[in-house]
Image (cartoon, rainbow, N blue to C red):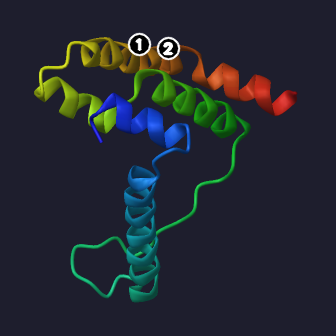
């Protein structure tokens, strides 16, 4: 998952092995959260209520920016740190971009959300 070529081949739909790994991880999490909801706090140390977040217009914009960044850099935030550990220099730029994007959202996120709700 830290290899740029593997990511590129996934986005080009030429090698779906990594997409399958991601899909299995998503399904495992869906099953775990469904099970946790049915437990309704019966487990010690697990929050009793798992509530859904409301849909916001900014989520679509954010998902598009996240996807574009992932496709361009060949990494997502988690694997960018793994790439740093592997000594891949390009990961430094990705991590800096993630930090700048997080800072920018903190500065303009609320006004961007309000603008998107009006439009």
The quarter of the picture where the C terminus appears is: top right
> Residue 113, position in %: x, y?
69, 29
For residue 100, which numbered disc appears in the image?
1
For residue 26, which numbered disc appears in the image?
none
Write down the quadrant of residue 1 in the picture.
top left
Relative vertical location of residue 111 with respect to residue 16 in this rendering, above or below: above
Q: Residue furthest front?
A: 14
Compared across the picture, whether 102 is left or right of 47 comes to right
Compared across the picture, whether 18 is left or right of 90 comes to right
Going 55% across and 44% down the picture, which residue do you hit? 13
Residue linked to disc 2: 104
The answer to whether the residue labelled 2 contacts the one labelled 1, judged by CB atoms less than 8 Å apart, is yes
> Residue 90, position in %: x, y?
28, 14
> Label 2 crowding class (10 Å Cα cut-off): few <14, some 14-19, many 20+?
few
Residue 99 seen in the figure = yes
Write down the quadrant of residue 84 in the picture.
top left
> Residue 2, position in %: x, y?
27, 35
Instruction: Identify the element where label 2 is drawn.
Output: helix
Going 19% across and 19% down the picture, which residue do you hit? 88
Relative vertical location of residue 103 with respect to residue 78 in this rendering, above or below: above
Relative vertical location of residue 54 with respect to residue 88 in this rendering, above or below: below
Label 2 – label 1 distance at C-alpha: 6 Å
Q: Residue furthest right?
A: 119
Going 51% across and 44% down the picture, which residue do you hit? 14
Relative vertical location of residue 21 with respect to residue 115 in this rendering, above or below: below
Going 55% across and 37% down the picture, which residue do you hit? 12
Write down the quadrant of residue 56 in the picture.
top right
> Residue 42, position in %: x, y?
31, 88
């Amino acid at each position: 998952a830290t290899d740029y070529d593997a990511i590129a081949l996934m986005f080009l739909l030429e090698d779906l092995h990594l997409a399958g790994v991601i899909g299995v991880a998503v399904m495992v999490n869906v099953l775990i959260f469904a099970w946790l909801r049915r437990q309704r706090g019966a487990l010690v140390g697990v929050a009793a209520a798992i509530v859904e977040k409301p849909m916001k217009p900014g989520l679509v914009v954010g998902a598009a920016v996240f996807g574009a960044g992932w496709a361009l850099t060949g990494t997502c935030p988690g694997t960018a740190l793994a790439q740093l550990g592997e000594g891949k220099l390009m990961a430094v730029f990705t991590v800096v971009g993630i930090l700048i994007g997080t800072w920018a959202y903190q500065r303009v996120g609320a006004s961007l959300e309000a603008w998107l709700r009006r439009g």
